[in-house]
Each structure stands twice: as structure tokens, then as C-alpha cells.
Amino acid sequence: MTIRSHFDFIFLGAGCASLSLLLRLIRSEKFGDKKILLIDKDAKKSNDRTWCFWEKENGFFDEIVFRKWNTISFLSDDYNADMKIAPYQYKMIRGIDFYEYCFKEISKHRNIEFVQANIDEWDYQEKLLSIKLNDAEYRFDNTILFSSIYKDNSKGKKVIKLLQHFKGWIIETQKSSFDTQKATMMDFRINQNNGTSFVYVLPFDEKTALVEYTLFTKQLLEPEEYDEQLKNYIKSFLGIEHYKVSEIEFGVIPMTNEKFSFESNGWNIGTAGGQTKASSGYTFQFIQKKSQQIADCLIAGKSLKQIPQSPRRFNFYDNTLLEILYHNKLPGKQIFTTMFKKNKPQQVLRFLDNESSVKDELKIISSLPTWPFLKAAIKQL
Ligand SMILES: Cc1cc2nc3c(=O)[nH]c(=O)nc-3n(C[C@H](O)[C@H](O)[C@H](O)COP(=O)(O)OP(=O)(O)OC[C@H]3O[C@@H](n4cnc5c(N)ncnc54)[C@H](O)[C@@H]3O)c2cc1C
């Protein structure tokens, strides 16, 4: 491994947050004379995740959007709806396309170096970074550090944490089985024996779809339980008997009221910087917004301390909802069903994106069962 002695920017982790920011810096053409180091334990060559999110206009990564839908379906026992979400579109980006796209661009810039190594530990103070990579220690001075390495600091503290965990199969069927015009965002008709759980179905074409079984619970399931639930769903709800599983995805996203700071031992970005929404696990678009803010600030030569935080009322809503889910005060199935049943989908999507108006929020909150929410809200205060 060769590491030059000086780098202007160092990125720990080369996942969604680091690459989203780095690509913006590259595109600005303002940092061609800066030395940039990117370190990740992984080569970033596998399709390790699929990102779904909604967006109104063309986004920064629109070129690599794999599929998009204008209609999303929500299904529950007493409420089924196909919802047109214009001006939004529900979009999907495959991890492998994202990594290839970013690294292709990075490889054109000789000022950027990628090192594949495990980061054992690091310390950063006064622009001085000492870092242990594969047991060897390196020091860099006068460098700006961005870290996207998430460490679970919740143990022993008064924080609550749920896991959003999911297993997805890309299935291929012999007959036409999927309606490509719509994506099933949440299907809550499945049994809730393991806690808040739903399935989403993202059709690639009439014979191929990603079917993902998702839970918001405290513990992971045994591996075979995810498979069992997926098999049941495909048979009982999709009515498909014959299919081939061509790819498998598994993931865990922390949903926690832990306080993350953007500035602490460098600049924390991505999930490590608190960009995962505590009540839903959605992260991709929050990373995009923050990356744009950071890039704008760096381009303008301003301090990153000036980046405004998301209004605090959204933390309050997230923590309230998390509290309810964590303590099983109301089933998640009931909360999400009511939310979608009694509000316009665009209103709900804006709310989940932290972009709603107070008026929207009052409408959504008043549609939910008052007592459990009031009690959980008081606890937050
Ligand atoms: C399977 C999966 C699917 C998801 N789907 C969605 C979705 O549909 N929509 C959405 O909004 N969010 C989704 N998320 C949540 C979130 O968007 C992703 O986790 C996103 O990748 C977070 O970006 P990040 O940069 O914070 O972390 P990552 O993208 O995970 O990047 C962190 C990087 O750090 C590296 N790293 C970690 N530890 C070390 C170490 N010790 N040494 C060296 N390198 C290290 C990792 O290899 C990784 O490349 C999903 C998450 C997963 C896991």
C-alpha cells in the first residue's frame, strides 16, 4: 500500500455518503489541485444494496436510476391503494451501478487515491489525523476528515434503538407476474408475529422483481425465518409458484434516538453523521441533501459549521414515533395504515422527507391515535 504524506481531504469509508460528496466536489472542478484519499475495507464491487427514495426533479444521480415509478401501492388488511405521487417519482438505484459510476469518475482524477484497508482506529484533532490501517499507523497533518464509519455508541446510554432489518430476493418468474407501472412501497397484510413487518415489491419488468421482507424490531431473526416469510409471501400474496431467486440482499439499518454530531473527531457524514431518519430508516435522500450543503460550503470557502441543521421538530416527531414502536404502544401497521389512509401520499412523503410544513404535520399528527402519541410526545419533552 502506498500512501502519500499529505492529503487535503481524507474520507474514511467509500460508501454512499463519501461518494455522494466526493462526486460533487469533482463535478465542481474546484478541487483538482487538492489531494484526496479515500479508504474502505471493501473494494465496492458488489451489488450490496438497493436504494429507493422519492424525488420531484432529476436528482444528482439520475443517470444511474435503474427504475422509477409514478404510482406506489400501499396494502393493509382494511386499506389498499394505488397512489399517484406526482410531482414525485419513486426511484431505485442499484448499489453496483452507483459504485461503478462513482469509481469510473474517480479513476479519471489522479489527485484522488483509493486505498482498500481496514481502519482499526483513528484520532483527529486540530487537523491532525492518526490512523491505524491493517495494524500499521499513519499520520497526516493539515487534513480535512470526513468519516462515514458508523460505530454503535448506544450501549449503556439512555437511548432506544430499533433495527430495521430486511432480506430481499430478486425473483425471476416464467410467466408475466408483475405490473411494472407501480411499486409496492409497503404491504402490511403479512402476519405481524415478529413485530412491525411489511414487504415491498419493486418490479424490474413483468417477470422480474425485488421482493423484500422488512421488520422494525429490537432483534434480528434467525436467517431461515426471513426465507420462510419471503416464500410464504410470494406464494400466498403474489400467487407465484414457480420462480428462480437470482440475487439476495440483506441489510440492517439502525433506527435510534441517539444524538449524532456532524462535527466530532472530524466531520461525520452518512448514517454516522445522523442522516438516517430514526423513524423510517430512510437515508439516501438525506445524504444527498447534506452532501450538497457540504459541497456548496467547501466551494464557497465557508466553514462547515455554518450548515444549518434540519428543524428540531423533526427529531421530536421521529423520537415520538420511535418511542411508540419501541415500546409497542401501537402496532406500526396501524400507524402507517392510518397515515396513508387519511392523508395525501404527497403529504406523507414530504413528512417522511422532513420537508413538510407545520400545517401538513398538524394534519398528519391529528389523523393518528391521540393518546399514545400524546403520551410518547410528553415523554420526549
Ligand atoms: C442493504 C441496505 C439497503 C438500504 N436501502 C435503503 C433505501 O432503499 N433507501 C434509503 O434511504 N436507505 C437505504 N439504506 C440505508 C442507507 O441509505 C445506506 O446504508 C447507505 O449506504 C448509508 O451510507 P453511508 O455512507 O452512511 O454508509 P455506507 O454506504 O455503508 O458506507 C460506509 C463505508 O464504510 C466502510 N467501512 C465501515 N467500517 C470500516 C472500517 N473499519 N474500515 C474501512 N472501511 C469501513 C464500509 O465498507 C462502507 O463502504 C439501506 C441500507 C442497507 C444496508
Image (cartoon, grey):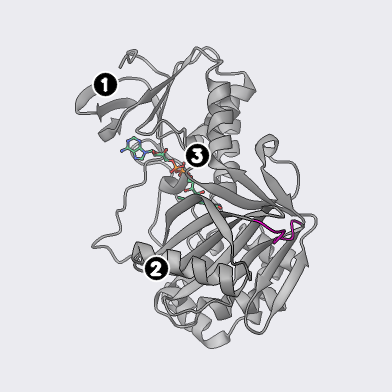
**Magenta residues, as a range?**
174-180
Q: Is residue 228 visible?
A: yes
350 left or right, relative to 34: right
Q: Is residue 13 magenta?
A: no
| Residue 164 horizontal/vertical position (percent) | 44, 62
266 left or right, relative to 208: left
338 left or right, relative to 117: right
Nearer to me, 283 or 364: 283
- Ligand 1's image quarter is top left
Q: Which corner quadrant of the image does residue 9 belong to?
A: top left
Q: Circle 3 sits on which residue?
A: 17
Mark 2 and mark 1: span between their CA atoms?
46 Å
Amino acid of disc 1? Arg
Nearer to me, 122 or 297: 122
Q: Is mark 1 within 8 Å of ligand 1?
A: no
Q: Is mark 3 within 8 Å of ligand 1?
A: yes
Nearer to me, 182 or 26: 182
9 left or right, relative to 132: right
Q: Quadrant of the N terminus?
A: top left
Q: Which mark is residue 225?
A: 2
Query: Who comes first in sequence, dot 3 or dot 1?
Result: 3
Q: Residue at x 32, y 19 (%)?
A: 141
